[in-house]
Each structure stands twice: as C-alpha cells, then as structure tokens.
Amino acid sequence: MTENRSDDSADATKDGRRSLPPGEVLRSARSEFTDLTGLHAEGVSRFERTGDGWVLEVEVLELERVPDTMSLMATYEVTLDGDGRLSGYRRVRRYERGRADPSRRG
C-alpha cells in the first residue's frame, strides 16, 4: 500500500508545531492585509519564507484614475510571524500603473 500525501498538508516545525502550507499562508495574509488597510491585493510579487516567518510584497491599487494606465499602484511589504499571522506592513514603492521600472545597469 502506498502512502499519499496532499500537497497542502502542513509540515511539523522544529518545535513540533504544525506549519501552515504556503497557499493557506498566502490566502490568510491577503485577507488580513485587506481587513487592516481596506486595500485589495491585485497581485503578489514576492512570497518568501524567512527564519522568523514569511515576507510578501503585495501590489495594490491606491488611487484609480482614467485612463487606467494613470492609476496609482503601490507595493507593500507584508511580514508574517511563524504561525502565518500578519505582524506588520509598510509601503515600499508607489508608481503609475502604466510605468515600468527604470532599467538598472550592473
């Protein structure tokens, strides 16, 4: 008999607690962020596990304008603790939707 394991099952952490699967962490973080700020995430451009929890970068619409390419967007860095609960957020960038980042030279 073969043991099947669901992709969204939780894994045990070093201290024996069950860690949340990444998809559940992401859904919960987006929901908590919206509840706190009133801003709806249009996308997540970074989702990374750290030693203390998780870090996300969330793209949101801050100010809708016409035409849509002139709307103001923002990137927020959202930090989560080891249990996946939101522990802080800050705006790290604000830009017009139609503008690309300037190219960087190395």
Image: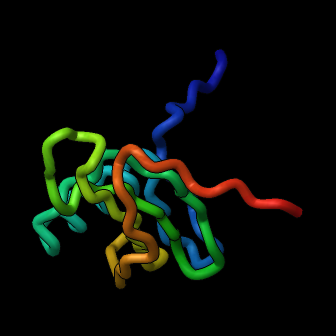
Please indicate whether residue 85 sits to the left or right of residue 66 in the image: right
Q: Is residue 67 above or below residue 82?
A: above
Q: In this view, does 96 lie above or below 87?
A: above
Residue closer to the observer: 88 or 24: 88
Residue closer to the observer: 79 or 77: 77
Residue closer to the observer: 62 or 31: 62
Q: Which residue is drawn at 53% across and 34% down?
A: 7
Which image quarter is the C terminus in?
bottom right
Q: How is the image coloured?
A: rainbow
Q: Which residue is drawn at 15% across and 74% down?
A: 36
Which image quarter is the N terminus in?
top right
The residue at the far top in this view is 1
Q: How many labels does the image show?
A: 0
Q: Which residue is drawn at 70% across and 54% down?
A: 103
Q: Where is residue 16 in the image (x, y as percent from the top left)?
A: 56, 72
Q: Where is residue 68 in the image (x, y as percent from the top left)?
A: 22, 40
Quadrant of the image occupied by residue 14: bottom right
Q: Residue at x 27, y 58 (%)?
A: 72
Quadrant of the image occupied by residue 20: bottom left
Q: Where is residue 42 in the image (x, y as percent from the top left)?
A: 30, 46
Please indicate whether residue 38 sits to the left or right of residue 60 in the image: left
Residue closer to the observer: 30 or 13: 30
The answer to whether residue 7 is seen in the rendering is yes
Q: Where is residue 92 in the image (x, y as percent from the top left)?
A: 45, 76
The answer to whether residue 79 is seen in the rendering is no
